[in-house]
């Protein structure tokens, strides 16, 4: 999924194509192949960070800090309980 030559912009775009975030409850949700949101399997930010590390996502220096910045990026759309993206 990730490789060491991708830029942060490319990594954020990739994350945004696979996840949405619901900040009011602190969870992330996968985007299904049919572009629906998998509401049944919320992922906490800490679990998402660990999953992304397992998938090969790396930053520079403090990896956790870089990943936290990437998952809080505007590249990942915010959603609300009704399932409507804000962007």
Image: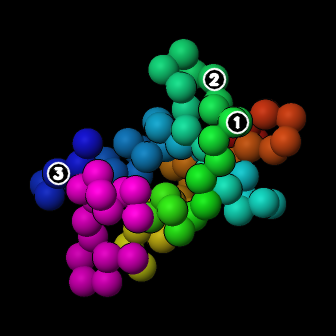
Q: In this figure, which colouring scheme has been used for the structure?
A: rainbow
Q: Residue furthest left?
A: 5
Label 3, label 2: how many angstroms apart (C-alpha)?
26 Å
Please identify, in this view, whether the residue under mark 2 or under mark 1 is nearer the observer.
Answer: 1
Would residue 59 be visible to someone looking at this image? yes
Secondary structure of residue under mark 2: loop
Identity of the residue drawn at 63% across and 41% down: 41
Say how many tags the image has: 3
Would residue 21 be visible to someone looking at this image? no
Label 3, label 1: how many angstroms apart (C-alpha)?
28 Å
Q: Residue furthest right?
A: 82
Please identify, in this view, whether the residue under mark 3 or under mark 1 is nearer the observer.
Answer: 1
Q: Position of residue 80 (x, y in %)?
A: 81, 44
Q: Mark 1 highlights which residue?
A: 39
Label 2, label 1: how many angstroms apart (C-alpha)?
9 Å
Q: Looking at the image, is 35 positioned above or below residue 71?
A: above
Q: Can you tell which mark lies on residue 36? A: 2
Q: Can you tell which mark lies on residue 3? A: 3
Q: Rate crowding at label 1 as few (under 14), some (14 to 19) or many (20 or more) other CA atoms within 10 Å.
A: few
Q: Residue furthest front?
A: 40
Span highlighted in magenta in the image: 50-64
Upstream in sequence: badge 3 or badge 1: 3
Q: Is residue 53 magenta?
A: yes
Q: Is residue 73 magenta?
A: no
Would residue 11 appear left or right of 6 to someone viewing this image? right
Q: Quadrant of residue 85?
A: top right
Q: Can you tell which mark lies on residue 73? A: none
> Given contact means CB atoms under 8 Å apart, are the residues at marks 3 and 1 in contact?
no
Q: Position of residue 47 (x, y in %)?
A: 51, 62
Q: Position of residue 36 (x, y in %)?
A: 63, 23
């Amino acid at each position: 999924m990730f490789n060491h030559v991708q830029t942060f912009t490319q990594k954020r775009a990739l994350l945004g194509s696979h996840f949405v975030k619901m900040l009011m409850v602190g969870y992330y949700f996968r985007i299904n192949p049919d572009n629906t949101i998998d509401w049944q399997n919320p992922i906490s930010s800490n679990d998402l960070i660990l999953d992304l590390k397992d998938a090969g996502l790396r930053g520079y220096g403090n990896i956790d800090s870089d990943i936290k910045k990437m998952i809080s990026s505007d590249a990942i759309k915010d959603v609300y309980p009704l399932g409507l993206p804000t962007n």
